[in-house]
Amino acid sequence: MPIYDALYRRYQARAPLHARRFWPVTREALRQVLLRRMLILLLGFSLLPVLYPIGRVFVVARMSQMVPLLSVDARLFGDFLAVQTYLSLVMLLFGGAGLIASDLNSGGMLLYLSRAISRRDYVIGKLAAAAALALSVTLVPAALLYAVALALLPERFLHWNLLWLAPAIAVQSLLIASILSVSALACSSLTRRAAISGIAFFAVLMGLDLAQALLVNSLGLDAAPLLSPLASLSIVSHALFGSAPGGAVHWTWALLSLALFALAALAIVRRRVRAVEIVA
Amino acid sequence: MPDANTPLVAFHDLSVAYGSAMALLSVNGAFPAEATGLLGPNGAGKTTLLKTLMGFLTPRSGRVTAFGLDPVVDPLGVRQRVGYLPEGDCYLPGLTAAEQVAFAGELSGMPRGDAVSRAHEVLDYVALGEARYRRVDTFSTGMKQRVKLAMALVHDPDLLLLDEPTNGLDPKGRDEMLALIRDVASRPGMGLVLSSHLLHDVENVCSHVLVLHQGRVALAGAISELTGPPRRAYDVRVKGDPTALLTDLKDEGCDWTQGEDGYRVLLAETQGPELLFRLARDCGAQLRYLRPAQETLEDVFLRALDQPRA
C-alpha cells in the first residue's frame, strides 16, 4: 500500500504566539526528570528533614517546660533551609545536570530552536524546571513548617516581630533555587554528557566552598566566603534569620557576589545555546 | 492562501558574513509556493541562506522577506510558518512518536489539544499510524525520517525546508519518501525547499531550482525552462578525430560538452540537425550516433558551476 493514502489536511486554526512559550519546555523537562524513579526517591528523602523541626514545634506547643531547651524562632527556619540547600544541590546534581546536556546529545536542541520559541524561552523553560526541583525541597517544606508553626504557636508566629518570616523564607528559598539552577544549567550546557555535567556542577560548588574555608582558616581572609555561592547564601541566611555564623562580610556583598555568579553562569548558558548552529 | 505566482520568500541583494568572510554576496532570488531545489557544492552558502531565512543570522546588507515578514524583526513569526526537517536526528529520548510530534506542534504555538489530535493525523499521513505509540529511539532510519517529516508538518507550515530528507534510506524507503514529499508539494499554497546533493531527488520532486556557488546565485528558475526544449540538444558520437567538427560547431555558434562516450551538442534556436550532417561532411568526419537529448538537471547544474561532465 502506498504510504500517502491518507490525505494531507490543512490546519486552519493557527493562533498568535502566546507569552508563556517556555511552558512546554518546562513541562517536558520536568516530565523527563520525574520519569526516573531515583529522583522520586530522592525527592521523598529530601522532604524527611522537615519532620525534625515540625516535631520540635509540636513538642514546644504541647510541653511548655521544653521552651528553654528547644528554641523555636526564626533561626529554626534558617537552619532548616541551610540543610535543604545541600539537598537541593544533590537534587539538581541528578535532575538538573542533564537538562541541556541531553538535548545537545540527542539533537533535541534542533527540535526546540527550529520552532517558534526563542533562545530565551528555551533557557527560561529549562531554568524554571531546575528551579521547580530546587523549590520542591526548599520552599515547599519550609512553607509547610511555617504553616505548622502558625497553627500550633499562633501567639508567637502571628506576632508583629515575626511577620517578616514568611517573605524571608520565600526570598531565601528563591535565592537558593536561582543560584543552584543557573549553576546546574551552565554546567549542563558545557557538555553532551549528563554525568560529566553533574560532576562539574558538584565540583564547582563544593570546590569553591572548600577553597573559601581553606582561605579563611589558613590565611584569615575575611572576604573569602564571597568566592563561594554556598558561603554567600549562608551569609544572607544569617542576615535574614539570624542563623549560622555570619562572618565578617556584610550580606549586601554576599548578594552582590551571588548576582555576579548568576550572571556569569547565564553568560555561559547564553554562549552555549547558540541558535545559529541549528541548521546543519 | 498565497497563489503559486507570489513568492513565499524573497531575497533582495542579500549579503551575509561570518566575521570578515562573506558567505552570501548580493543574493537575489525567491522561493515560490511550489517545490524548489536548493543546490550547490559544500560551502556554497545553502546553509547560510536557510539560517538567515529562519532568523538566526542578521544580513550584513540587503534583506529577506518571508510571508511578508522580516526574519530579523519577527523570527518567531517566520518560524511559526516554516516546517524544518533537519538532516540529523532531532528527537527527545523516551518519547513515543505521537508525543514527539505533538510536542513539536506545541513548540510551534499550537494549543495542546490541537497539537495532539493533529499529531495523530500527520502520523497517519506519513504511514506511521500503527507505530505511533512506539518510542522514536527504537525506530529504523526510514521511520525516523518519516517522524521528522511529521514533526515538520504538524503545524501545517506554509513553507517546508527539507535538508537531505532521503539520507540513509534504502531505495524503497527513498522512493516512498520522495512520493510523500511530492504529494506534500502538490498542495496548493504550500512551498517546499529541498536542499540535497542528490540531483535525481531534486529533479523528481521540484519544479524550480536555485543553485548557489561561492555565495552567489549561479542559476535560478523553472527546471523545465532551464533544461530547454529537447530538439536543441543532441548526443553525438564521431568516428575519428572530432577536433575539426567541434571547431566548426563553435564557429556556427553551437555549444558542446564532452560526455562519457561522445558529445552533447547544443544547437542555436534556428538550427536543426541537418547542420551536423553538413559540417561532418565538410570536415570529413563520420557521425556514428545522433539522437535528440533532453538536458538533465545535472547538465544544467554542472554548466552553472562551469564544470565538465564526468
Image: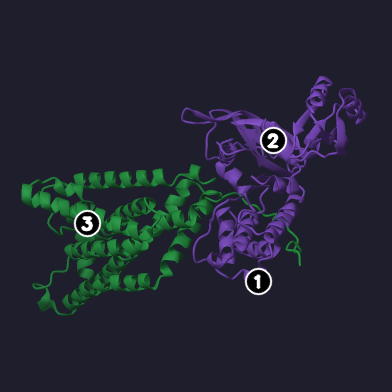
Chain colours: A green, B purple
**Could you tell which of marks 1 and 2 lies nearer the N-terminus?**
1
Q: Identity of the amino acid at label 1?
A: Glu
Query: Residue drawn at (29%, 56%), measured in percent from left and top?
Result: A201
Q: Secondary structure at mark 3?
A: helix
Give the number of the disc on residue B130. Answer: 1
Front-lying residue, A260 or A161: A260
Q: Is residue B107 left or right of residue B183?
A: left
Front-lying residue, A188 or B226: B226
Front-lying residue, B281 or A280: B281
Q: Identity of the amino acid at label 2?
A: Leu
- Measure how far apart labels 3 and 1 are at the Cα level: 50 Å
Residue holding disc 2? B302
Visible in this render: residue A258?
A: yes
Q: Identity of the amino acid at label 3?
A: Met
Q: Secondary structure at mark 1?
A: helix
Say whether mark 2 and mark 1 are on the same chain: yes
What is the quadrant of the N terminus of chain A in the image?
bottom right
